[in-house]
Amino acid sequence: MNYHEASFADNKDLSHFELEIEDERPFIEYSKEGNLVYLNHTEVPEALEGKGIAGALVEKTFKYLEENNLQVVPLCSYIRVFLKRHPEWKRLVASR
């Protein structure tokens, strides 16, 4: 399966950006303050680890945030590493 085509949702009730994959919901936990979105934690169920799902989730999240004119505060260690590997997304990182 191409995880970049998985269904993406902003679950506002849980403050999660989610993918729906094989009845599982990998997610990024976030908090929001104005136009800043603090990405706190990325979690992929153990059964789905090592398949590129976290990267697909971060990319879909960044696209969503960009479309909604929001800026990122990357608190999650995975997301900070992702940004080092994909510097093209640094344009979304809030300058503090």
Image (spheres, rainbow, N blue to C red):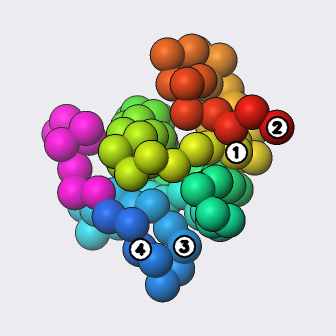
Residue located beneath label 3 in the image: 15
Type of amino acid under label 1: Val
Depth check: give the residue in front, 89 or 70.
70
Q: Position of residue 76 (x, y in %)?
A: 71, 46
Q: Residue at x 45, y 61 (%)?
A: 17
Disc 3 vs disc 4: Cβ atoms closer than 8 Å? yes
- Whether residues under marks 3 and 1 lie with C-beta atoms below 8 angstroms apart, the answer is no
Q: Which residue is mark 4?
A: 11
Above or below, 74 relative to 11:
above
- Which of the two marks, 2 or 4, is nearer to us in this view? 2
Q: How many marks?
A: 4
Kindly check if marks 1 and 2 are in contact, taking CB atoms under 8 A apart as contact: yes
Q: Is residue 25 visible?
A: no
Give the foreground label among 4 and 1: 1
Which SS class for mark 4? strand
Q: Nearer the viewer, mark 1 or mark 2?
A: 2
Looking at the image, which residue sits at the far bottom?
A: 13
Is 54 rendered above or below residue 18?
above
**Disc 4 marks which amino acid?**
Asn
Closer mark to the observer between disc 2 and disc 3: 2
Q: Are marks 2 and 3 in contact (CB under 8 Å)?
A: no
Residue at mark 3 to residue at mark 1: CA–CA distance:
15 Å
Q: Secondary structure at mark 1?
A: strand
Q: Can you say which quadrant of the picture contains the C terminus?
A: top right
- Going by the numbered disc 2, the residue's amino acid type is Arg
Q: CA distance from mark 3 to mark 4?
A: 6 Å
Q: Residue at x 25, y 38 (%)?
A: 4
> Residue 11 at what x, y percent from top left?
41, 74
